[in-house]
Image (cartoon, helix red, strand yellow):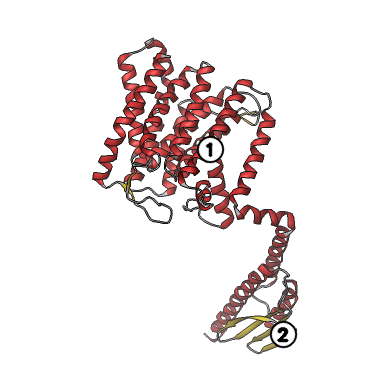
Amino acid sequence: MYSLLFLGIVSCVLSLLLTPIVRNASLRLGLVDQPDQARKFHVAPVPRLGGVAIFLAVIGSYALLLAVRLSSGTIVWEGLPLFVRLTPALAVIFGTGLVDDIVGVRPWKKLSAEVVAAGLAWFGGVHISGIAGYNTIGILGFAGTVLWIVACTNAINLIDGVDGLAAGICLFASLTMLIAASINHNFPLALAVVSMVGALIGFLRYNLNPASIFLGDSGSLTLGFLLGCYAAVWGEKSSTVLGMTAPLLVLAVPLLDVGLAIVRRFLRGQPIFEADRDHIHHRLLSRGYAPHHVVLLIYGVCGIGATVSLLLTFYHQTYRGFVLVLVVLAAWLGLQHLGYSEFGVVGKMLLGGGFRSVLSAQFALDSFEREFRDDLSLRECWEILCLNSLEFGFSGVDFHLDDEIHRAGVSEGWQARIDFPGHGYINLWRESGNQARTASAVLFIDSVSRVMHRRLSRFEKVLQQQHG
């Protein structure tokens, strides 16, 4: 117990002393986060190497503990290996974040480093032993552990967008793990996590609004990585179906945020690594909440998650399923409040038949393009075009290509004209107000243009060969 108190107090004091030193050094070196009025609304440049102060405070507290050898040296040396085994992985993830803070690292390289660090953590003894009641061994256990650690690493990194938010969430999570480890007499885990608690308390003195220093990637990546590792150790010995429920709850907000970001960008066709202003804290800010109110609100949610996770840890299987259902329901209600339009559109498509309509139209387009062989005559092209245009809601077709001139249907409403220089044109007519496959009609126009250009280009090459 004395060792835990010593680690917590020393890391807190070191963090309080080192953070302003790192802050001033960052200002002198120009390693600051510039406001851009797009995603970064702070008034003046803010140093971004807060992770260095936290890292030094944590390492320094362990060094001093071993130097003074409080309590029983044997007990400390038996508990410390959990942190020592993570040292190679910690060096990789901290180094990656530090390089990113100084010169920048491309997203895929950063992700690769995270995977390497997670792999090193697995070889160091951090394992997720079961998922949904199934034991994970071999490659499955390795993949599950790496995925979990990488997800936690990015979750903290992505939610670091408001003064004090990421550091405060990490404090709630690490303090929860410390309490659980202490009550369950898991001294190695308590010894590993207590220095993080102290360092974060000291750092928040400078990181709360208005922040004079930011975590930076060296801080957010390192904290997320360590929390992922410690959470895996926390749930490692659980053999129940929902053994990872407690760690999931304590990290629910950042994990939900990173999951939403991936799904949201996928649905919009945006690059997964592209930054945006649609994270949970951004949504709350856009709804009129002041930055400090956003932080307090998310702190409150994290506090509830931490309390519930501790209750589940102590009462084991009791009400686990019921609590999980409540958490899912609360998450759904929260999403409704945040107003993510992507999920509403997907829901309408799935429940209203829109998805089936789009899928049916895609099948029809594929069938149309398969029919349109390059060796078809222009008259055969015309016949296929007439048949398929009706299916996509077009009321008439004008076909003027070379010596083939045809017209079918009603030439009223609006028209889409597709020009083929040197050959002629095709007009597709559609009656105003026709809602049949409106979005798919545009895809059909593009498909007609593509297949006819290909057909005419092949015809020109054949003529050139004949006259050559």
Q: Is residue 191 visible?
A: yes
Q: Residue 399: x and y, percent?
A: 67, 84
Q: Can you say which quadrant of the picture contains the N terminus?
A: top left
Residue tagged by mark 2?
Answer: 411
- In the drawing, what numbered circle is on residue 42? none
Q: Amino acid at mark 2?
A: Ser
**Between 332 and 429, which is closer to the camera in this rendering?**
332
Local crowd size for mark 1, using a 10 Å CA cut-off: few (<14), some (14–19), many (≥20): some
Pointer 1 and pointer 2: residues touching (CB < 8 Å)?
no
Image height of 75 relative to 7, above or below: above
Residue tagged by mark 1?
Answer: 147
Say which quarter of the image contains residue 452. Answer: bottom right
Q: Residue at x 60, y 73 (%)?
A: 450
Q: Residue 464: x and y, percent?
A: 54, 83
Image height of 120 relative to 210, above or below: above
Decide if residue 103 is on the left or right side of residue 335.
left
